[in-house]
Structure formats: C-alpha cells, structure tokens
Image (cartoon, rainbow, N blue to C red):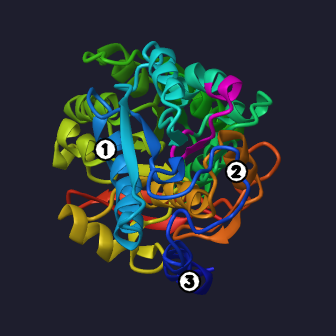
C-alpha cells in the first residue's frame, strides 16, 4: 500500500499539469472558446465549520482542499479554480441555507464536504436534487450512504467500520471488562456510540447522553465512577470530550477515555489539560498525515507553517478528484457526478475509488493516543 501511495501526488500533479483548462474538445454544452470560457471560471466549495466549537476540524479540512487547489493553480495559471468557503459552524440548522447558496452559484462544480454528519444529513438532499456533487473528507455517519443520493461520496470509512474497530481496541488492547458508552446526541456522536455498543455487547455496563455545548458533566462522571468502568467510550466532539476528561480526572476516575475522530484535535488537550488528557485513545478512519503519499506532508507544512492535522490529507484527495474533472474539461455538474462515480486513481491516502453508494473501496482505521501532550499514532486497527 505504501508504495502505491507514494505515486499519488506525482501522478496527480503530472495529470493536472498536462494542459491548460481549455485544452479539451469534449463537446461540453457549457464550453466556449478562449479565456472567457466558463471552464476557466469554475469554483469548488468547502462546506464545514470554520467558526464555532468544532472550527479546528473544519479549518484542517479547508486547508487540505486549499493546498490541492493552490498547487493546481500554480500549474494552470491561465485557468485558475477558486475555493469558496461555506461556514456551517457545524450547525445542521444552517446547512440548508448554505447549501442553497452553493447551488445557486452555477460556477461551483463540486463541494468538498459537508464536513460533519449532521450538516450532511440536512444539506445533502438539496445537493442531490440540484445534481451538485459532494465529496466528504470527514462525515462518517453510516446512514448517509443509504439514502440513494447520486451526488454523495466520501473518501473515508464510515462508523460501521470505525465503531467495531474502536470496540475491538477496547476489548483486545485495553482488555476492558466494564465500559460506559456516552454520546452527545448528534447524528455523528450517537451513530458512532451505537456501533461501539453493538460491538461490545454485555461489556457495556452503563450508557449516558450529554448535549453539545454542555459544560457540567457531574452526573455523567458520577455514573462512570459508580459503574467501576475500566474504559469510557465517547461519541462526540473535542470541546465536550475535553471537559468530560478533565472532570473525570478531577474526580479521581481512572477509566481510560476512548473517543472517535471528532475528538482528534489539539483542542481536546487544551480543554482537558495536558495531564488529564494523557493516555486518551482516539480512533479515526484517517491516515496519519506523515504516512500520506508523495510530498503532501512537506507541502502542507510549508504552506501553512504547521503539520497537517485531522482529515487534511483526505480533503486534499477530495479536492484533487474534482480538480481532475475540471482539468478534463468538465464544466457541467451532471458530468462531474459521472466523473467522480467512475474515478479510480491513487491519491495520497489510498486508491480513490467508490462503490455504488459513494463509499470508498479502501478503508483503514487507526488508533491514536495522547502522549506527551500530543496526539500521536498508536496502531492501525486491523
């Protein structure tokens, strides 16, 4: 797998640099000649949280997409593509209005996102009706691919892969006999927690549900302590997870906290405090960024003066698929949907290919651990 991934960026870069945007004669109904061609005035949308409690995750994803587009524009200076942000704040209630804005801009040929499962559930029906393709780098709710949406694709594994993997880690690596499962009632958090509960079976001795933006988790911590749990699984995002872990630590609860990919951000360590966060395990259907193919890691660090974070590489792959479609001369949304559906090329994270539901053909799930105040790879969960 590693040798294939290393080919991803050079292959993509070569493909993108072959010709200027108007270099195809593909018979697109929207095509015209010269620099005013609509094919040279196209946009890719980013849909996700850029402000709000989960903004760090959204910004990571936008940066990955931006890196791909910036590299494309460097190679195609006469025919550039614009990245248009749609800041959802991670709020499903805002998603339909933002989706309509993206749909109404006819120069937007595709969307990287939506980033989160709740906003995906709210926005994707509109994108499907409009025929505007979406490629998510991060939305994992299993049910998203079961709605018959023709425009839905994602480049990562869903919760039906992450949940069982997390459960397996809890059982086989932590050897936990008693587990409390907590979720934040969100589309993502509850869905993932349900998968973990199903995997763990009778090992689950208690469950609880909290709310996003909640800050006092005293009753939850009391339930964990009285259960005698060896481990706690949390389905939700890093802001609440950090406070739960801090309050567990303050109460002297020794159970290991295991959480899903929505917690894989340094904001968790900030909220919990480095000492309390130490030893927390976080699962993610995402590749450690330093294992990404080609020169992605170095390019990202140079562009943003920081190491790539959660889903940056997956977003790079998502944007690259759309850029290759643009490079091939596509300026029609329906043709872009068909292009993505038939895509089959190496990316920086995996071979990029989709099944008939828009799910990726290759899935990996990794366990990460908080060690020395940083989130570091622990092991791939086979």
Let me know if residue 264 appears in the view. Answer: no
- Where residue 28 is drawn, which disc sits there? 2
What distance separates the C-alpha of mark 3 from that of mark 1? 27 Å
Residue interval drawn in magenta:
127-139
- State if disc 3 and disc 2 touch (CB < 8 Å): no
Q: Quadrant of the C terminus?
A: bottom right
Please tell me whether residue 22 is drawn above or below residue 109 in the rendered image: below
- State if disc 1 and disc 2 touch (CB < 8 Å): no
Residue corresponding to mark 1: 59
The residue depicted at 80 percent of the width and 30 percent of the height is: 148
Determine whether, in the image, residue 97 is placed left or right of residue 63. Answer: right
Q: Quadrant of the N terminus?
A: bottom right
Task: Pick whichever of labels 2 and 1 is earlier in the sequence.
Answer: 2
What distance separates the C-alpha of mark 2 from that of mark 3? 31 Å
Q: Residues within 10 Å of mark 2 (few under 14, many from 20)?
A: some
Q: Quadrant of residue 308?
A: bottom left
In the rendering, at what x and y percent does residue 189 appear?
51, 29
Determine whether, in the image, residue 325 is placed left or right of residue 10. Answer: right
Residue corresponding to mark 3: 7
Q: Quadrant of residue 65?
A: bottom left
Q: Nearer the viewer, mark 2 or mark 1?
A: 2
Q: Secondary structure at mark 2?
A: loop
């Amino acid at each position: 797998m590693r040798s294939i991934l290393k080919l991803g960026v050079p292959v993509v870069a070569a493909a993108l640099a072959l010709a200027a945007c108007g270099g195809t004669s593909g018979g697109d109904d929207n095509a015209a000649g010269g620099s005013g061609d609509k094919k040279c005035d196209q946009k890719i949308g980013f849909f996700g949280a850029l402000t709000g409690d989960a903004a760090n995750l959204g910004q990571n994803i936008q940066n990955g997409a931006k890196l791909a587009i910036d590299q494309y524009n460097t190679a195609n200076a006469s025919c550039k593509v614009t990245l248009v942000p749609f800041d959802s704040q991670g709020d499903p209630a805002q998603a339909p209005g933002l989706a309509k804005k993206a749909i109404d801009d006819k120069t937007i040929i595709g969307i990287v996102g939506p980033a989160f499962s709740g906003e995906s559930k709210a926005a994707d029906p509109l994108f499907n009706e409009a025929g505007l393709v979406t490629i998510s780098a991060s939305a994992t709710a299993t049910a998203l691919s079961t709605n018959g949406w023709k425009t839905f694709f994602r480049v990562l594994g869903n919760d039906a892969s992450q949940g069982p993997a997390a459960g397996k880690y809890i059982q086989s690596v932590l050897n936990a006999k008693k587990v409390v499962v907590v979720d934040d009632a969100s589309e993502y958090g509850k869905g993932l927690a349900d998968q973990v509960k199903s995997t763990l079976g009778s090992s689950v001795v208690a469950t609880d549900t909290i709310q996003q933006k909640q800050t006092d988790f005293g009753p939850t911590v009391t339930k964990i302590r009285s259960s005698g749990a060896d481990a706690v699984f949390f389905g939700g995002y890093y802001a609440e997870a950090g406070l739960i872990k801090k309050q567990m630590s303050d109460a002297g609860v020794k159970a290991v906290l295991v959480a899903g990919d929505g917690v894989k951000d340094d904001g968790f360590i900030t909220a919990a405090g480095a000492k309390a966060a130490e030893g927390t395990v976080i699962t993610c259907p995402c590749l450690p960024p330093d294992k990404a193919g080609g020169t992605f890691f170095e390019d990202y660090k140079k562009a943003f003066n920081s190491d790539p974070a959660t889903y940056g590489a997956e977003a790079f792959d998502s944007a690259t698929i759309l850029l290759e479609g643009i490079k091939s001369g596509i300026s029609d949304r329906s043709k872009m949907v068909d292009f993505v559906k038939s895509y089959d090329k190496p990316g920086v994270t995996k071979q990029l290919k989709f099944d008939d539901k828009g799910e990726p053909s290759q899935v990996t799930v990794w366990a990460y651990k908080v060690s020395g105040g940083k989130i570091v790879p622990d092991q791939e969960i086979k």
